[in-house]
């Protein structure tokens, strides 16, 4: 069997890291002798998550540009130069058949150097609005795997393949386990369930919107699975102490996200590309609250791509504290509207994304050989 060597680069957030690991796992499953090396950014979450998934990783000192304090970018440029040299050394030492970039700081220097050394490169762009790094790298990439239609405005049309974003395999398997999932959270099958998630670190606006509307939530005939994220759990717990009853399950982290989705009749979420891909595959009605603190406001653009197809509702971050919970309570009580949103979002799903990306990778490597 053919023995491949791959470099996969990028990270910074779960939205970049989980698809990267999914691509690696799929390639390994098909070609067990493959050697895979990840390249990430020092002090970012990939330096923990990738080794936990069983892969070696090299860290680059690269960081993002500081738009608020331009003088700080002298240091940023210094780190970028160091990262380019380290990326070149890593690529020469490892000698990969291919380099894959999933977005995030590290993918820039890694793919740039790979292409300059004649190594075939593939980009996986998760968002509906391409990031600066991927737009620059597109000129050097052999293929660009995208999750949304209409990406020709960012990339050369002849290199684009619509594959969708890879998601965790366990999520789809849990679709039929609603009863089991509700039991896991100690919730009732008689009530509608709202799942509130803001990412692994949490989302301040979403948490404050829930905290400020606990009276409304306890008065309504609903139950809530509330993931606060690491930074907001203590504050949320204090607010919940004033209430009795088991209609709100609250934690900083959900270990069984498959069960959380399975239990939910409605989801409240940020509009990261990975989360949206999961919601499409599962056909979950969602209210999106795009984060305003991301590069090029890409979460709003992700959300608008769904709104245009009547596949989600959106509440702006600045309006969330007054509008989010009333909108959710009105929607979760409207069975016909939930069904319509579910059908429309599921129609946008791109299935078997990791397999399709691996197909493209193999074609490029074999063509090169």
Image (spheres, grey):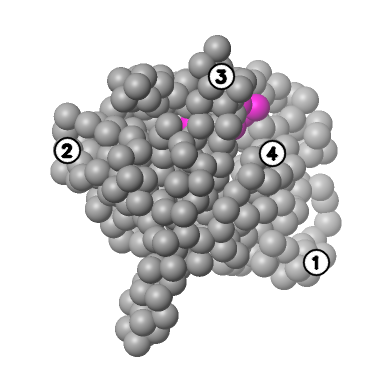
Q: Earlier in the sequence, mark 3 or mark 4?
A: 3
- How much space separates mark 2 and mark 3, taking CA atoms? 30 Å
Any magenta on residue 74?
Answer: no
Q: At numbered mark 3, what does the secondary structure look like: helix, strand or loop? A: loop
Asked which quadrant contains residue 222, the reply is: top right
Residue 276 seen in the current view = no
Asked which quadrant contains residue 44, the reply is: bottom right
**x, y percent for residue 175:** 62, 22
Q: Is residue 267 above or below residue 188?
A: below
Q: Earlier in the sequence, mark 2 or mark 1?
A: 2
Q: At numbered mark 1, what does the secondary structure look like: helix, strand or loop? A: loop
Q: At numbered mark 4, what does the secondary structure look like: helix, strand or loop? A: loop
- The residue most toward the front is 93
- How much space separates mark 1 and mark 3, taking CA atoms? 55 Å
Q: Is residue 95 above or below residue 339?
A: below
Q: Earlier in the sequence, mark 1 or mark 3?
A: 3
Q: Quadrant of the N terminus?
A: top right
Q: Is residue 60 left or right of residue 310?
A: right
Q: Residues within 10 Å of mark 4 (few under 14, many from 20)?
A: few
Query: Which residue is labeled 1 in the image?
Result: 242
Taking depth in this image into account, of 354 and 207 the one nearest to the observer is 354
Q: Earlier in the sequence, mark 2 or mark 3?
A: 3
The residue depicted at 44 percent of the width and 24 percent of the height is: 358
The residue depicted at 64 percent of the width and 64 percent of the height is: 211
Q: Mark 4 near mark 2, Cβ–Cβ under 8 Å?
A: no
Q: Is residue 130 left or right of residue 231?
A: left
**x, y percent for residue 39:** 52, 50
Query: Which residue is labeled 2 in the image?
Result: 156
Q: Give me the disc on residue 54.
A: 4
- What stretch of residues is rendered in magenta? 166-172
Taking depth in this image into account, of 94 and 294 the one nearest to the observer is 94
């Amino acid at each position: 069997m053919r023995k491949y060597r791959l470099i996969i680069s990028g990270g910074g957030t779960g939205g970049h890291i989980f698809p990267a690991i999914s691509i690696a796992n799929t390639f390994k499953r098909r070609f067990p002798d493959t050697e895979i090396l990840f390249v990430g950014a020092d002090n970012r979450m990939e330096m923990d998550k990738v080794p936990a998934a069983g892969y070696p990783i090299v860290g680059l000192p690269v960081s993002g540009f500081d738009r608020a304090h331009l003088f700080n970018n002298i240091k940023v440029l210094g780190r970028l130069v160091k990262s380019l040299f380290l990326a070149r050394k890593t690529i020469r030492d490892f000698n990969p058949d291919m380099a894959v970039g999933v977005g995030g700081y590290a993918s820039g220097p890694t793919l740039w150097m790979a292409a300059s050394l004649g190594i075939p490169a593939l980009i996986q762009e998760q968002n509906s609005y391409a990031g600066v790094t991927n737009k620059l790298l597109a000129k050097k990439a052999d293929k660009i795997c995208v999750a949304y239609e209409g990406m020709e405005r960012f990339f050369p049309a002849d290199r684009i393949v619509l594959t969708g974003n890879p998601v965790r395999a366990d999520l789809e398997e849990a679709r039929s386990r609603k009863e089991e999932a509700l039991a896991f959270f100690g919730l009732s099958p008689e009530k509608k369930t709202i799942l509130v998630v803001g990412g692994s670190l949490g989302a301040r606006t979403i948490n404050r919107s829930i905290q400020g509307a606990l009276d409304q939530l306890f008065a309504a005939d609903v139950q809530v699975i509330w993931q606060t994220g690491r930074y907001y759990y203590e504050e949320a717990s204090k607010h919940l102490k004033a209430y009795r009853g088991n209609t709100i399950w609250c934690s900083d982290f959900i270990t069984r996200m498959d069960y959380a989705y399975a239990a939910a009749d409605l989801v409240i979420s940020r509009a990261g590309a990975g989360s949206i891909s999961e919601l499409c595959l599962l056909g979950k009605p969602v209210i999106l609250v795009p984060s305003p603190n991301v590069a090029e406001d890409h979460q709003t653009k992700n959300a608008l791509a769904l709104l245009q197809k009547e596949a989600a509702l959106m509440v702006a971050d600045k309006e969330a504290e007054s509008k989010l919970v009333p909108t959710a309570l009105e929607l979760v009580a409207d069975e016909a509207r939930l069904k319509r949103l579910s059908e429309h979002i599921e129609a946008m799903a791109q299935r078997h994304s990791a397999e399709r990306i691996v197909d493209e990778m193999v074609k490029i490597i074999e063509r090169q050989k």
